[in-house]
Image: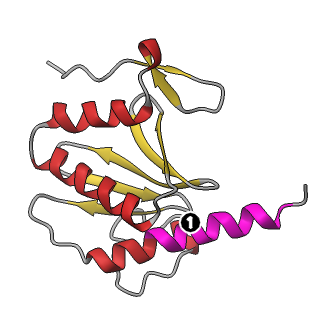
Amino acid sequence: MKKATPTAKRTKGGSNEGREGTSPSQLIDARIKELSDWRGETLAWVRALIKQADPEAVEEWKWRGVPVWSHAGIICTGETYKNVVKMTFLKGASLEDPSGLFNASLEGNARRAIDLREGDKIDEKALKALIRAAVALNTSRATARPA
């Protein structure tokens, strides 16, 4: 039997808002709580690092229950699966990754992902740098567009 996921409705911008005005942040809180294992702890850790790296990051809830962090475009998603928490950077192929954090979705032209498994140790400083690089790429592209 599948676990129930927080119910949400689609809003105009593609992000979701829960019933009766539940915010994306509240939906992410609920997802972390419902996981109640290493995946919830890992998702909470990812969330905290994103907020530390970019305090202006906006939390969204898209695609029927995927936590998303944005700043002038999507920074990354925080998908949870049975054996992995996946951080997908939609423009990851355009980012420098000197620490080699990307370990999934390496063949695509745009996306890159980091699969986090139970017990994995990730270089926080390198991950924050990657998050900041994604924000810098988003903001540079946003300002480069003609009005």
| Pick the front one: 65 or 26 | 26
Q: Is residue 78 above or below residue 120?
A: above
Q: Identify the image quadrant of residue 109.
A: bottom right
- Residue 135 position, x and y percent, is 56, 66
Q: Identify the image quadrant of residue 45.
A: bottom left
What secondary structure is found at the residue carrying circle 1? helix
Q: Quadrant of the C terminus?
A: bottom right
Q: Is residue 49 magenta?
A: no
- Residue 133 position, x and y percent, is 53, 74
Q: Residue at x 31, y 22 (%)?
A: 6
Magenta: main secondary structure equals: helix
Q: Quadrant of the N terminus?
A: top left
- Residue 89 position, x and y percent, is 47, 60
Residue span colored magenta: 131-145
Q: Identify the image quadrant of residue 124.
A: bottom left
| Pick the front one: 51 or 147 | 51
Q: Residue at x 81, y 67 (%)?
A: 144
Q: Is residue 138 above or below residue 3?
A: below
Mark 1 = which residue? 135
Q: Residue furthest top?
A: 20
Q: Residue at x 62, y 53 (%)?
A: 73
| Pick the front one: 92 or 30 | 30
Q: Residue at x 53, y 75 (%)?
A: 95
Q: Is residue 41 left or right of residue 114?
A: left
How crowded pointer 1 is (Cα within 10 Å; few <14, some 14-19, many 20+) is rated as many
Q: Residue furthest bottom?
A: 98
- Residue 76 position, x and y percent, is 46, 55
